[in-house]
Image: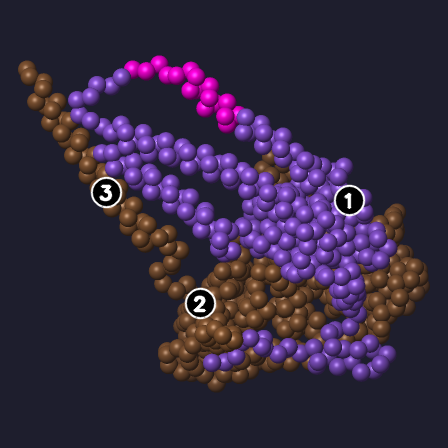
Amino acid sequence: MDLTVPMESCIRETLRVTLRFRLAFVAGFLTWTVSGCNEFQPQAPLPYASDKATSAKLADKPKVQARVSQLVSQLFGPNTEELRVPPGAPLPEAGARIASQVLLAEGDSTKPGPVIHEAGKPDTPIRGGLGLYREHCMHCHGASGDGNGPTALFLWPRPRDFRTGVYKFTSTEGTGVDSKPTRQDLKRTLLDGIDNSSMSSFAAVLTPSEIDQVLDYIVFLSLRGEVETTLATLGQDVSEDDAETDLSEDVAQEAIDLVFGRWTNAAERVIAPPSARPEATPESIERGKQLYLGAKGLQCFGCHGLDGKGNGESFVDYRSFVRAVFQGNPSQDKIDELKDFAEKNSKKWADDWGQPLRPANLQAGRFKGGRRPIDLYWRVAKGINGTPMPAHFSSSGGSLLTSDEVWDVVNFVLALPSEKSLLEGAKAVELAPSTDTANNLPSAGSPDPSQQPAS
Amino acid sequence: MRYWSLLFLVTAALCVGSFVYAMFDPNWWLLHNVSVRSPLHFGAEIDRLTMLVLAITGAVFVLTMLALSWALWKYPASPGRVAQYSHGNHKLEIVWTLIPAVILVFLAFYQMGSWADIKFRSRRPKSAPLAQVTGRQFNWLVRYPGVDGKFGTTDDLHVINNLHIVKDQAVLIDLKSQDVLHSFFLPQIRLKQDAVPGMTIPVWFDVDTPGTYELVCAELCGWGHYKMRGLLTVHETQAEFNEWMTSALAEQNQTQPAGATAPDAQASDPATTATDPASSTVERS
Ligand SMILES: [Cu+2]
């Protein structure tokens, strides 16, 4: 048999293959260089993700649910990229800065957003809150503002869910959705970040104008989410057949008015301390310490601990907490025991967003809501929205603190990080039984002792 | 195919050309150096070393590329020519090993003085640290000791991503990290120092021109690495710096909402804290 022929054809074949391969390689390389590495582009605009609690309200009413979505998308735009601002929205410039283009109130035509005027340069359109949010915020806070972006899982505390309209660190009266942040509150969060969390400062990353644009968009996400929740709540009383008629556009307008109203008057509801801050004298600090340890029945140490390290008895122990946040370590033998414990207590130590949390370690001197005395006054006096940290100041008195006492606690909390010996060997103040009973006699203005919050 | 040699020659010429062009274009070249005429002038020192290394490597690059192109031109593939076996050339090998070795040893000794000035702890300014800078995912936390000159007391000034110093004054910074490796990088001063968790690392430098410069993180420290950008503000005079410090402390000690006056004056008007006016650069079209 002559082997040379197949051998030769084999070589020829190989050559042809390599030639084809080279051509393909060159062609591929050229297409790649010409097209560039395109950024990831989703096929269609991302839809909004509804809040779980909100959609659960209408779980058995698909028609009502559809009607709510229809109304919300009429008001705020159909998806996360086509935005519409309802008239009267509590946003500067009628919300024009939330995106480089917004949908007109009626119809689907768009109108361009504002432009930047700079001397000697042609006008350029603004990036708009949406574009900036997508670049800097979305990876944690999510496309819908649900606090569930791709990097959110790495973080603790978890990023905020803007849809509920509850903001932790506000300066205004009220609690939960009623205590809205002022523009200043939001701006401080963006400029200073939130210490002891992964929220970083954007002062050197964004320009002042860009910060305004992002803030507008974040408020827009809250407005939309709150209106959706309000409509879903109203929808609970509507039967499937009457979805169209009972959830009319007038009803939607009422929801809008309710939600927008909460935001519009925020600036007028800022709490100004009725008494000036006293000098942080040792006496004032000592009074604050006694209040912290329960001199007036407030049990700050119950959560923040007798040594101020955030390890109080009435709070979940550290191991269960780690287990809930980081799914624990399977090699731990007490895991089942901890599971029961965690389930039983999950209500107690979760915030309104269902995320477990820890009381602050006051010895660390790191204050999420800011370290200015006024920030700490607000934290103590009105609490932290959406968390078990309650309000401690009531102008009507009762067993809550007076304004002067709040300042004493503030002075104590500010002094603690540099004077750690303050709480060395501290014991809870034991109230004399007689005065205790007298204080706890039911009287107007004094809260029910069983409801009395641990601070 | 001796024309391949031209491709190599042209590529090399483009490389050299882009470097020459870059030197005359401030947008292409290194950032403007602001640590040149100051007493420590580390920036000038680093740039001098960088240029020396660039000159040496540039010369070697040019010579190598010329030799490569010449060899490709001179000895193209020619059908029928028989390959030759060569055992190599000892002398040549010794030469091309020794020359780079000598250059490297020279550079290693030549830069020792600069390295010592910039990094040896014994050379740090004898003054107390001006500030503590702590890296944290994803911020630079800056802490000034305040009036008492001691860190960890109630009069400390805490600012974020914001370092202020005075022109021509050698400043000492205590660099720390709270979580992972970060790197304190002042590109306009040519200063870079890793921040290592658990360590306090002294960093010192000075600046010759007042202004605002970048402070960035130069160690990929997580998904928010790029957000770790701060500003270094250099004041003309100590008085100007003190003024800044006073106003920053006043802000940190604020006891009333912005715009409201102390309650004793009975004039607190929370409404003045309302939405501040839209940024002046943005107007409706
Ligand atoms: Cu970093």
Check contact, mark 2 vs mark 1: CB within 8 A.
no
Q: Specify few, some or many for label 1: CA neighbours under 10 Å numbering under 14, 14-19, or 20 or more.
A: some
Mark 1 sits on what residue? Answer: B125
Judging by colour alone, the chain drawn in brown in this rendered image is A
Disc 3 marks a residue whose amino acid type is Ala
Q: Which chain carries label 2?
A: A
Q: Nearer the viewer, residue A140 or B202?
A: B202
**Are labels 2 and 1 on one chain?**
no
Disc 2 marks a residue whose amino acid type is Thr
Q: Residue A176, how many percent across, how many down?
A: 65, 69
Q: Residue B75, how many percent across, how many down?
A: 27, 27
Q: Is residue A333 above or below residue A369?
A: above
Judging by colour alone, the chain drawn in purple in this rendered image is B
Q: Is residue A323 visible?
A: no
The span picked out in magenta is B85-101
Tell which tag, 2 or 3, sits nearer the viewer.
3
Q: Residue B45, how many percent across, how many down?
A: 64, 43
Residue at horizontal 84 percent and vertical 58 percent from the top: B147
Is B100 magenta? The answer is yes
Q: Specify few, some or many for label 3: CA neighbours under 10 Å numbering under 14, 14-19, or 20 or more.
A: few
